[in-house]
Amino acid sequence: KGRQMLLLEDCGGVPLDVILAREQHQMNLTQSFRLAIDLARAVGQAHKSGLVHKDIKPANVFVDNEGRVHLTGFGIASRIPRERQIPGPPEVIAGTLAYMAPEQTGRMNRSVDSRSDLYSLGVTLYELFTGELPFTATDPMEWIHCHIARIPLPPSQRIKGLPSRIDDLILKLLAKDPEERYRTAAGVEADLIKCLEAWESKCITPVFELGQHDVSDRLLLPEKLYGRSVEVEVLLAASDRVMTHGDCEMVLITGYAGIGKSSIVNELHKALVPRRGLFASGKSDQYKRNIPYATLAQALQGLVRQLLIKSDAELKTWRDDLLAALGPNGQLMVDLIPELALVIGEQSMVAQVDAKSARTRFHTAFRNLLGVFAKAEHPLVLFIDDLHWLDSGTLELLEGLVTDPQARHILVIGAYRTNEVGPTHPLFHTLGTIRGASGTISEIVLGPLQVSDLAQLCADALHSDVALTRELAELIFEKTGGNPFFALQFLTALSEEGLLTFQPESASWRWDFDKVQAKRITDNVAHLLSTKLTRFSAQTQRTLGQLACLGHIADRLAVARVQERSLDQIDAQLGAAVQAGLIHRFDGSYAFSHDRVQEAAYTLIPLAERAATHLQIGRALLAQIPPEELEDKVFEIVNQFHRGSSAIDCTAERDLAAQLHLIAGKRAQNSSAYRSAQTYFAAGRSLLEDGSWERQYRLTFDLEIGQAECEIVGGELVGAEGRLTVLTQHARGFKDEANVVCLAVLLYFTTGRSESAVEVALAFLSRKGVNWSSRPSEAEVRREYLEMRRQLARRPVNDLIDLPAMSDPDCIAIMAVLTELFPAAYAVDRYLLEIVLLRMTNLSLEHGHCQSSSVAYSALNMTLGSHFSDYATAYSLGQLACQLVDRRSDDRFKARVYSCFAAFAMPWFKPLPICQPLMREAFEIGRSMGDMAFAAYNSRNLITHLLVSGVPLSQVQIEADQALAFASTIQLGLPAERFLGQLSLIRNLRGVPCGNSPEDEDWANQNVDTQPQLAMMVCYHWVFRLQERYFAADYAAALEASGKVAGIRWAMRSSIEEAEYDFYSALTCAAAIDNAS
């Protein structure tokens, strides 16, 4: 049927595990020796055939009727002489855990090779001679711990009478480090024969040196670390602190390319096993640095995949923890790690919120996700390799994680090239911010190896004496500068060039120093690797070049699609490179063994052909992606079109590439990766030719406005303002014009130009017949109020919940502009604010509800109550606002609607304790949706309510301290102590005096006429000072504070502090009069 089959001879034998179970330790020692010798010979024959078995155990050993051994079970055998095992879940590691070599677990920083089979042979011989396994365990992780950390009892301590040399032989096979085991099965066989001969001659304690015939003619470079013991200890100490005390730490490992940064980190795997720690790693790609969160997704993907093989009961526990941690924001993390949906199920879409809230929400969801994996019972190590190539979004996430006081049981490790990061590099800024925020950072700087280290490396590789390899080491140091990666490549090149040869007659390696010195082997590692790659076939070189274009790690299927070949054909083309250890194959992907190998493979493509190659790859990937999968795969595709853009020679394809950049930009924007999004938008715009505003209006507009949005979020306000000017000139249609105006209003308000924000918004509204001045009259406000009353007379408030959704696009656009105008109007003019709220209400009553309607309804008490004393209507419409946002689970304004209603409408109509549950709920909603500012304002408002309600001061102090801690973690534009002005009042009332510094006085006396948020805090400051001084009977100071409030009373309109101000001002005046009389 065309399927490949493995045909094995039926030897008619019995599995060795069956024999051992049947014999019950009764097998005579001579028989055991003969079986052991035959088994070692069989393993040696497999190795000579180029196979690494990877599953040697008694069940895969058959003994025929004549006592001959047959090795079977080649299902996972490999022809790759040396390959890395990734540290995946123990349940899915190929092989049998009880017989598995430590490096097969992926947790030893060593590759799997023929010596791994010798370890498994050692376990099998241990069982053959003792009837027992060297270790026992109850679960997979305990088996791994046994193999990498526990020392087995000598066999003779289990079975008396065993020759002592058998102890030594088997324990040598069971060495944790492959370099300390036998090198060949032939060496094991030779020593077993000597043991048998001694046994048969009645010599109980034979004396001979093990391994005399253990000679390999293959150059196998050692993988242990040289000259790095101090650095490893620093890393292990940081790991131990995190695991013991729980504080989050960051360790930076720096040095040049090839210096061994990743190798240092991989030493951690052994330390994590006893603690059942988790390890997640991601490697940045120099050619994919604009793909948002790609490296983090790679790391977290590994964690999530470990969950998918858990039992149903375990998986349910993880699922419950994840759902509780992520709350309504699960989809954000599913978008980042699609496999997560297999664990937590399908998630509802998240609410659309403003850019700042979206970023905060995403960061919070990310930290909550990590918090599920990072716990005392299983701490987490997160390793990010090549930090210097990270996208800005991931840098922001790491900054937030390391500086978050709530982050626990996480060790973040980052490695980067020293020469790539200067003072202008984003990573330099991120690390400075972390240090400035008192984040814990340790730094390990890796330098080159010394000649003595290289001499030891050569001695181990060539099985020679250090004194004999010193001269060679000095030459290697001269050529490589002590760079470990380059040194190993140099040694390999000597062997390949025939300058380093194995001499069978002396069973040793030889080199002619003069010839090595005379041979002009390059001292450039890139050239050395390129030379090695050019020895492959032309087809292999072509495939390697395309693989390098796809990235450090590339999906096998993607490579096959690009070449329009089968997976088997691709595997055949890359087989030689895999055999040479230059690339690895795992999990359906190919990965380069080192960045330098990828760089060398990329140079196989002539410079003049690289853009065309990228374009061809992009076209191939795009052609084979179903339309419904395009958004999920767009980053990989657009990356190729971007790097191949100079080869695009027709307008239609340039437009197509620009459209792909737009999709990528929006995808990045939705993930709060605004700098990456900006890069995609800008690149897409640059692809469009002159005249695109007329020929491709929609595409041009979307790219320009997307870039403007990102510039505003990123603080590039000058560029954003210029772009908005261009957009204003070209925008067509009311909706597009409104979008531009909303951004302009946001920009002007953000930069403190509230008057300009109002001017832009009013100019737009006038084009729709809404003609207001920036300072309308009281009569205009009253007319708008009477219009509202007229509409409410026709339909009771209780019936308004059933109004249809607003559908008129012009009305929706006007509502969007009015919503954006709200905060600027608050700063400019009281009546402008009131007329904005009333017009939003009237438009909603006439044309139906939209999301902005609830914002207006919840804040109406600022005009209905304070101006018209119509508190009942304000309360009823505030209730309606809450009902509307409750109906829409994705309502972006839910936190602020609850907040405004609870703080500005309810207190004037209901007892204060009734308001407080809604405030607490608003806080939680704001925090979950990333609306941290409104969450903080809720907690601030709640403290005032508790004070005014007469809650015991000790309890209010606890709540205030919690609010202070929360406010300290977010950016409010002023110190948290000033934001929570009640703290001074609470402390003084509790007998803990706290004076005001000169800086506090200067802050409280500044001009805040055009800064509404600051004005509000200053106003509250003087209200609390008024109360504090009144209680202290310092009526002169209280009167002074009251006078300070009078000029900025507008800033606290409708808040409970306004009532407190009137009450305590009156009491102060009365007390002052009494004192005067």
Image (cartoon, helix red, strand yellow):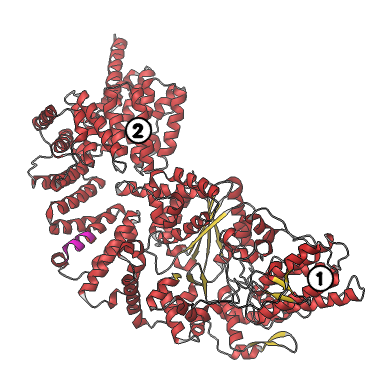
Q: How packed is label 1: few (under 14 Cα within 10 Å), some, or many (20 or more)?
A: some
Q: Is residue 636 magenta?
A: no
Q: Is residue 699 magenta?
A: yes
Q: Main secondary structure of the magenta part?
A: helix
The dot on residue 1001 is 2
Q: Separation of disc 1 and disc 2 at Cα?
A: 91 Å
User: Which mark sits nearer the N-terminus, 1 or 2?
Assistant: 1
Up-down: is 359 above or below 491?
above
Residue 33 locus on image (x, y percent): 82, 73
SS of the residue at dot 2? helix
The residue located at (42%, 25%) in the rendering is: 986
Given residues 551 and 60, the one toward you in this image is 60
The residue located at (45%, 27%) in the rendering is: 957
Q: Which amino acid type is marked by label 1?
A: Ser
Residue 746 locus on image (x, y percent): 23, 47
User: Badge 1 is on which residue?
Assistant: 32
Classify the position of the C terminus by image quarter: top left
Residue 325 locus on image (x, y percent): 45, 44
Up-down: is 791 above or below 239?
above
Q: Which amino acid type is marked by label 2?
A: Glu
Query: Which of the 4 image quarters holds residue 66?
Result: bottom right
Given residues 160 and 707, the one toward you in this image is 160
Residue 557 locus on image (x, y percent): 42, 71
The residue located at (43%, 79%) in the rendering is: 543
Marks 1, 2: nearer the viewer: 1
The dot on residue 701 is none
Q: Is residue 654 visible?
A: yes
The magenta span reads 696-702
